[in-house]
Image (spheres, rainbow, N blue to C red):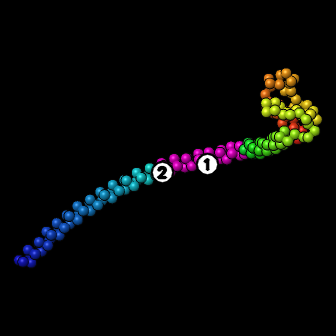
Amino acid sequence: MIWEISVAVIAVAFAVLVVFLVKTLKAAENSLDKTTQTLQEVQKTIDELSYEVKSVVRQANQITGDLQHKMEQIDPVLESVKNVGEILNEVTLATKQVSTALIDKIKSPSKSKSSKVSSNTVPVVTGSEIPPEATAYAAPASSAAAVPGWMKWVDIAAGVWQKYRA
């Protein structure tokens, strides 16, 4: 009889163990089903995003090609701007040299000139030193105060520059 009770207890214990294992396996199966559904949804989302990412990459490539084409078109303009800057630098340097030479000539008048130069009048320069274009603002002695002195010097500098460039 002990054997029979022992076998019955073992059978009941095995049945209880099987019931709990079945419940655990059912819970694991439900978890795996949910995981499978989630992975399928993620895969679908990735596929949709993949298409959109490919579309964005194509558009970025088109934009890059367009930008390269436009940059190639702008290159000559930038080269021209560079050349204009160099020319302006040359003009500025030449103007500075002409101005310096002209100021030096005014500050140290030649010994052959006997006229005095006052601070508010323009020095007298002979016709051989001034080109005809530079005398556009030349005025009679009575109206010398009407024309500012700097305008005469601008004309002189322009004439000298034209002769220098010719």
Front one among 83 and 61:
83
Name the side, left or right, on which 13 lies relative to 151: left
Q: Nearer the viewer, residue 74 or 35?
A: 74
**Residue depicted at 33% across the width and 55% down the height:** 34
Q: Earlier in the sequence, mark 2 or mark 1?
A: 2
Q: Is residue 64 magenta?
A: yes
Q: Residue furthest left?
A: 1
The quadrant the C terminus occupies is: top right
Mark 2–mark 1 distance (CA, rounded to whole Å): 21 Å
Examine the image and state in which quarter residue 103 appears.
Answer: top right
Asked if marks 2 and 1 touch (Cβ < 8 Å), the reply is: no
**In this rendering, does residue 33 appear at all?**
yes
Could you say which is closer to the camera, residue 73 or residue 6? 73
- What residue lies at 20% left-to-right and 66% top-to-bottom? 18
Q: Position of residue 42 (x, y in %)?
A: 42, 52
Residue 148 pos. (x, y %): 78, 28
Q: Is residue 162 magenta?
A: no
Q: Nearer the viewer, mark 2 or mark 1?
A: 1
Instruction: Give the residue number, with chain letter if any, for mark 1.
Output: 61
Amino acid, disc 1: Asn
Which region is colored magenta?
Answer: 48-76
Task: Find residue 45 and name its label.
Answer: none
* Quadrant showing the N terminus: bottom left
> Which residue is tagged 2?
47
